[in-house]
Amino acid sequence: MIERTPELMDERLNHAPCGYISLTHEGTIADVNQTFLDKMKYTRADLLDKHMESLMSTANKLIFHSYFFPFINLNGHVDELFLSLKDASGQSVPYLLSGKIFQNDSLELTDCILLPMGKRIEYEQELRSAKKQIEQAYWEKDQALAKLEQIHREIEQKQAELIQMNTILVELSTTDKLTGLKNRRYFQEKLEEQIALFHKTLQPFSLCILDIDHFKKVNDTYGHQTGDQVLEQLARILKAHARSEDIAARYGGEEFVLILPGTDGPESRSIAEHLRQIVAESSWITGSLTVSVGIATYTAEETDATILKKADQALYTSKLNGRNRVTHIVEIPE
């Protein structure tokens, strides 16, 4: 553990107009300024000696591993790395991270400045520029050419993977193009946030999966264009009748999901039943249409995977029992 002295964090740096984190060579947090703590609603004890990756989602951990550590160990610094860090409530906060290695005879730390997010394309351009500089540096270091060429190949592969990932992230939006609802990626992020909020406040929430009954028959009978119109109309119904705090998304194909914050089992079933009735009573281009619904309410023993699995199991039961019905997982005998 790093011995902390006043020299590591003076008063001006502690209240600087940007976040500051000091990392050990292994990536654990050696020190952090008050500006970052206030922004992210942590205490100093929450973060000290924790690994930096404890603040990141899986995707950001991959970026941190594949770019930050190799680059800073090779060059001694990193400029404008885009990351999203989780605050104390589990919300994602975007940052641009710039870091530099500080080293003396007895100490090696990586000092990181955290600034508000810049344009993603600027980060990609900086990455390409850094790659050219590294390549030029390799050619200038003739005595270590063989070893550096091997490092170059490894880093270039990681950079290519990171650029590809970054391009995908830039192109992806949070909205499903066909229906105008939020997409699966956005739903997954919000589900993780609801789970984090639950473990902090014990506020309940429920998850519904809605599936259009006999949707394959719609496509086979009327064509995929009509099928798309059906999906669009169902999305409009969900938008119009979901509560303002609910999160509606297209999960894939003819499946839709609803996160119902602050909602226990009986209330979630009432909401789902209301939506099912609206769908069944609406006018459709196909003449009639129904949905089946499965529900699960989050408990302390759940994970994002298990609550999805339970809601899907409840949906399957609704289908098995004749469709056009709502089933909560607690209704299924063990």
Image (cartoon, grey):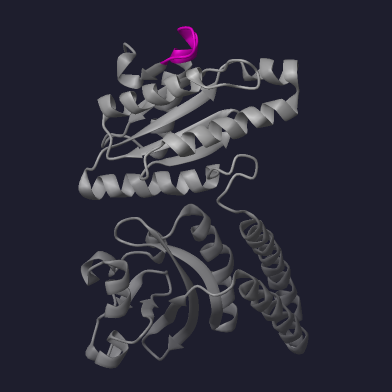
Q: Which residue is pictured at 59% across the width and 79% down the height?
A: 74
Residue 109 location (% of width, % of height): 40, 81
Task: Give, as a single range, the part of the protein colored magenta.
Answer: 317-325
In the image, residue 42 above or below residue 249: below
Camera sees residue 33? no
Q: Is residue 160 left or right of residue 252?
A: right
Q: Which residue is pictured at 76% across the width and 89% down the height?
A: 140
Count of number-bearing discs: 0
Camera sees residue 73? yes
In the image, residue 323 above or below residue 263: above
Q: Is residue 25 left or right of residue 29?
A: right
- In front of the other: 271 or 93: 271
Quadrant location, the C terminus: top left
In the image, residue 49 above or below residue 282: below
- In front of the other: 208 or 145: 208
Q: Which residue is pictured at 65% across the width and 78% down the height?
A: 126
Residue 132 location (% of width, % of height): 74, 80
- Residue 218 part of the magenta-drawn span: no
Q: Quadrant of residue 242?
A: top left
